[in-house]
Amino acid sequence: MSEVCATAVPAVPVVLAGARGHGRWHLANIRRLQDEGLVRLVGICEPTPLTEEEFGAGPPAQSADLGALLDSTKARVAVISTPIPTHTDLALTAAGRGVHVLLEKPPAPSYAEFRRMADGVAGAGVACQIGFQSLGSHALPAIRELIADGAIGTLEGVGGAGAWARDEAYYRRAPWAGRRRLHGADVVDGALTNPLAHAVSTALALAGAARAEDVETIVTELWRANAIEADDTSCVRITTAQGRPVTVAATLCAERPREPYVVVHGSRGRITFWYKQDRVLLQRVGQGPQEYVYGRTDLLENLVGHLTAGSALLAPPDATGAFMRVVEAIRLAPDPAPLPDAAWRLVPGGHRRVVPGVETVVEAAADTLALYSELAAPWAAPHEASTR
């Protein structure tokens, strides 16, 4: 059910910056909400306009200049799904015109850029939502309630696991793909900071450590099987201000890709949350397992509800500050080390590198809250860890 009654307020005019790549998802989502009468797509910002074949008949106004497009369309919301290094400047372009922002994750390639963005939009008095869609899951408040009620005993830590597969074309999809920096600017497009960033942000949220000040220390281990700058097989352990470990492991080199998940460890049980499916498994000492599936509030719909009905934002910048501390730790860590040739192989066809057995190591890290090196992964030497 929509957060906003379509008959109560006029549709909110929206501009989409970045309608190709992941932007196609946003375009489809905007169209869905437009059909419900909540928003109205009034403009698309792309260096090269979308063709009629890409958009369909009757595209809205298009321009390569976001500021000019916002001025001409009188948009109230800008959805920004552009290359990572452009996020801060485009968000501030919108904020400077009083336009509210839905900013795709990761919100920035460095903590300094994140702060410049977050402080800028706050100073402009506009709302900003960061595109961590999993933070809109109704499972999160349900899991927090279970933790608070002592369903799994004392909270001991949170793990996260993501085992996906990406072929070589994935790293050729854009000039910034798989880069740590480009033309002197930070990018930090690694497994934990972009494709599996939701595992990190969701784990931190369930650990009660979403804000920057909730993080005490961060240890990273960054590896790559592919011929890229960034990491494609990595793990991180965050120690929260409460002294709890949050360990997230990820790879883009899985032989058998699996649904990513977050697992909350308690003294008398655990809660596993498959965040893309909004599915929760509760396991407790002395009781049978219980499984639940929850709904989800779309983040653009939530932003519209915030503007029109005063709904609280689900993913404001402050709720992603701890995630950005992780991005910063990865940015400042030594460049990812190449895995030994013996650790990976090409799948038949020769367009994808896999690390045999890596799925097991990823899941073991989430299960035990240990780093790869502590799990004696044959390719993960302890001296490669970086502490911040």
Image: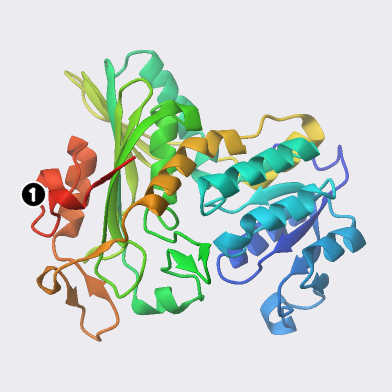
Which percent across, then down, holds residue 259? 33, 53
Residue named by callout 1:
376
**What's the amino acid at mark 1?**
Ala
Q: Is residue 321 left or right of residue 27?
A: left
Quadrant in the rendering for residue 243: top left
Which percent across, then down, holds residue 23? 61, 65
Image color mode: rainbow
Quadrant in the rendering for residue 367: top left
Which percent across, then down, holds residue 146? 38, 20
Residue at (74%, 68%) from the top-left corner? 45
Residue at (39%, 51%) from the top-left corner? 332
Q: Is residue 142 left or right of residue 296?
A: left
Residue at (64%, 45%) from the top-left corner? 116
Q: 28 and 231: which one is in front?
A: 231
Q: Residue furthest top?
A: 149
Q: 306 and 128: which one is in front?
A: 128
Image quarter (top left, top right, bottom left or bottom right) of the C terminus: top left
Image quarter (top left, top right, bottom left or bottom right) of the N terminus: top right
Q: Is residue 197 left or right of residue 93?
A: left
Circle 1 Cα neighbour tier, 10 Å, few/some/many (<14 / 14–19 / ≥20): few
